[in-house]
Image (tube, helix red, strand yellow):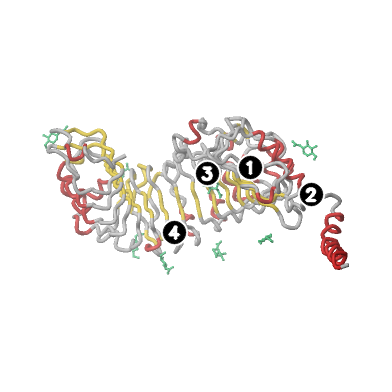
Amino acid sequence: MPSIGWVLLFFLAVLPALATSGAHGDSKPAFRCHPDQAATLLQLKKSFSLLRYPNSLESWQDGTDCYFWEGVGCSNSSGHVTSLKLSGLYSPGLDPAIFNLTSLQRLDLSMNSFGQYSLPASGFERLSLLTHLNLSNSGLFGQIPIGIGRLASLISLDLSTYYDTIPEDYLYGQFDYVYNSLWLEKPNFQILVANLDNLRELYLDGVSMSNSREDWCDALAKSLPSLQVLSLGSCQLDGPICLSLSTVHSLTVINLQDNFYGSSTPFPEFFMDFLNLSVLNLAQTNLQGWFPRRTFQSKTLRVLDVSWNQYLSGHVPNFSNASSLETMMLEWTNLSFVKPDPFSNFKCLKALSLDAHFVSMEPQSSLGIPRSLQDLKLSQMNSNSDLGPTLSWIGDLENLLSLELSGHGWVFSQTSLSSVDNLKSLRSLSVSGCNFTRPVLFGNLVGLKSLEISYCSFNGPIPSALKKRSNIG
Ligand SMILES: *[C@@H]1O[C@H](CO)[C@@H](O)[C@H](O)[C@H]1NC(C)=O
Ligand SMILES: *[C@@H]1O[C@H](CO)[C@@H](O)[C@H](O)[C@H]1NC(C)=O
Ligand SMILES: *[C@@H]1O[C@H](CO)[C@@H](O)[C@H](O)[C@H]1NC(C)=O
Ligand SMILES: *[C@@H]1O[C@H](CO)[C@@H](O)[C@H](O)[C@H]1NC(C)=O
Ligand SMILES: *[C@@H]1O[C@H](CO)[C@@H](O)[C@H](O)[C@H]1NC(C)=O
Ligand SMILES: *[C@@H]1O[C@H](CO)[C@@H](O)[C@H](O)[C@H]1NC(C)=O
Ligand SMILES: *[C@@H]1O[C@H](CO)[C@@H](O)[C@H](O)[C@H]1NC(C)=O
Ligand SMILES: *[C@@H]1O[C@H](CO)[C@@H](O)[C@H](O)[C@H]1NC(C)=O
């Protein structure tokens, strides 16, 4: 009798569980990520040859819940994949299966190798909920498809390739980058951005836009009036930078470096009125004429780079809050400083590049380069004269991690470099164009990890102290 009671009790206990599984119509556990989505992801997995070591999408197993798969984000309510982030994989092209994940909001396939295959001409338009798309450094090739221009919800679009940041041995040499491997012709830039009303961040560095001529600039002002980040480095753009860009005053980051080879551009003065500007990079943009005698209105400007514009003359500008500036790149320009104490307001400066010509004209005490400096680059392009003792102040920059001295000619002699040996924190030292008459020692540079000496004339042997330093890479 007591045993019958126990059996009854057992049935009562399992009954609710049986009822629940019966309601779902099968005995499989309830997955939080829909099995349809898992099937699509597994098809995608097949297209990757899984070079990555040690974990090659190991969690992506048939019959398991894709809610827990690496790189996959799944909505709690619908069970659909809403975000996907994969990197370090190789695939001969992008498998169109991905366009079946129509609930995707964030897709990040940056840092993969799609083997120089073209982007699929159609399919992207199906991902109409996408807000963030990142295909940067993914080794894709060819015309950017119009489907991306139909993604009206996009907030951030990154199709950039940064040639200088790709590690040489990345993916065991599987990467094979071609300069300007993506391009905008049909559609061109104007058509691509025409319907991207919500876009706030646009990165197309390295995408060839040579076919857009000057029109890119007016199109941008017209279609993207609320843009905050504009990064179009090395896009083969043609100038000049149009006046209508002055209406996009929401911009916080402007990077147009390495463009405008066909036409010289005056410095676009209206950028100085953008109140939220934090990064302005116009390096190597064929700027000519005089830097405006005006003040940058933004109180949050962190980075100013106008280097490699050798015909840009005048004075380094004023800043309404110089102490927010962390990086100022001025090498290979014709800009000079207002004296005295040109650096006294730059309390937080961490990186600085200068044409050594101007430094050599100042008496060393008046420079006042802040001790906070971590990276210093001095180049001497315009003369062959020895910079000699004018560089002795370098020895006071006790926080310096990286120092690069480059000259055309024998401008760095033993005397100009003697103070470098005081820099105990230095990690990286690069000198080109030097004339050593005594053996070089650098015996105090105990933290040095990288040493590069090129185009130098030595009078005497390379010191054995240096040869013995095994920590130098
Ligand atoms: C989804 O569910 C998990 C676990 O129950 C929870 O931690 C997470 O916050 C939920 N996510 C959302 C967006 O509701
Ligand atoms: C997309 O899904 C449909 C229907 O579920 C299916 O017929 C088709 O084969 C899938 N396409 C790809 C490329 O996986
Ligand atoms: C895109 O991915 C790259 C590499 O993972 C990353 O550095 C970059 O910040 C991403 N872009 C955006 C807009 O988040
Ligand atoms: C600058 O940023 C602030 C705070 O994010 C914002 O309220 C303001 O509208 C921005 N100004 C411009 C010109 O976009
Ligand atoms: C910087 O401001 C000072 C004082 O406000 C002014 O005398 C000087 O001319 C300005 N320099 C430049 C380059 O505009
Ligand atoms: C460099 O600037 C000086 C004035 O500071 C000017 O006289 C000279 O013409 C400029 N050189 C070039 C190449 O623009
Ligand atoms: C100037 O910049 C510094 C450093 O970024 C910041 O702490 C300070 O609040 C800024 N001052 C003003 C007036 O914006
Ligand atoms: C290096 O400096 C010495 C002494 O100043 C000078 O005699 C010699 O010509 C210089 N060498 C070169 C290659 O300029």
The secondary structure type at the circle numbered 4 is loop
Q: Position of residue 111 (x, y in %)?
A: 54, 40
Q: Nearer the viewer, residue 118 or 99?
A: 99
386 vs 178, left or right, is left
**Few, some or many residues within 10 Å of mark 3 (<14, 14–19, 20+):** many
The secondary structure type at the circle numbered 3 is loop
Q: Which residue is mark 3?
A: 232
Q: Which residue is mark 2?
A: 28
Callout 3, which amino acid? Answer: Leu
Mark-to-mark CA distance, 1 and 4: 29 Å
| Residue in view at x 50 percent, y 53 percent | 253
Vertical arrangement, residue 231 with respect to residue 11, above or below: above
The secondary structure type at the circle numbered 2 is loop
Callout 2, which amino acid? Answer: Lys
97 vs 238, left or right, is right
Q: Counting residues from the N terminus, which is met first, the one under dot 2 or under dot 4?
A: 2
Q: Which residue is mark 1?
A: 190
Q: Which residue is mark 4?
A: 301
